Image (cartoon, grey):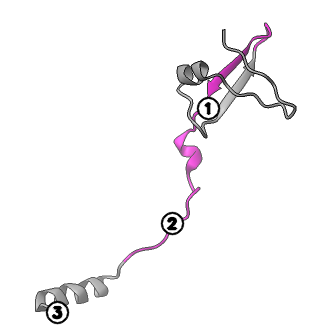
Amino acid sequence: MAAATLTSKGQITIPKEIRDALGLESGDRVAFRLREDGVVEIHLETLDLTSLHGILKSKKRGVSLDDMDRDVAREAAGE
């Protein structure tokens, strides 16, 4: 059985064999569930992709048709 010690800040290190069994890596989030029988379950917390919608701001990198036409004409002329 794997064991861990609780620090004064309420933190524990999850034993390596448990991390390996759950596929946990540094930075992963875990969820805890206390069952009615007193057993604590730990699960890898996964994100729903829809929850990430809008997290990144888009940068407009568009090019106008006039700019494209001008650059194509330059290339065609050998400039």
Q: Are marks 3 and 1 in contact (CB under 8 Å)?
A: no
Q: Tag 2, which secondary structure? A: loop
Numbered tag placed on residue 45 in the rendering? 1
Q: Residues within 10 Å of mark 2 (few under 14, many from 20)?
A: few
Q: CA distance from mark 2 to mark 1?
A: 27 Å
Q: In the rendered image, which residue does mark 2 sit on? A: 58
Find numbered disc 3 in the image and state the secondary structure of the residue it sits on.
loop
Which badge, 2 or 3, is on the more N-terminal residue?
A: 2
78 lies left or right of 11: left
What's the amino acid at mark 1? Glu
**Range of the magenta residues?**
35-62
Q: Residue furthest right?
A: 8
Regarding mark 1 in the picture, which secondary structure is present there? Answer: loop
- Please state which amino acid type lies under the numbered disc 2: Ser
Which is more N-terminal, label 1 or label 3? Answer: 1
| Frontmost residue, 38 versus 3 | 3
Q: Which residue is mark 3?
A: 79
Residue kind at label 3, given as amino acid type: Glu
Distance Cα–Cα, label 3 vs label 1? 55 Å
User: In the figure, residue 43 lies in which quadrant?
Assistant: top right
Magenta: main secondary structure equals loop
Residue 1 left/right relative to 76: right
Quarter of the image where one finds residue 72:
bottom left
Magenta span contains residue 34: no
Q: Answer left or right for 19 relative to 60.
A: right
- Name the residue: 72% across, 24% down: 32
Residue 61, position as x, y percentages in the image: 42, 74
Res 14 quadrant in image:
top right
Q: Residue at x 58, y 18 (%)?
A: 17
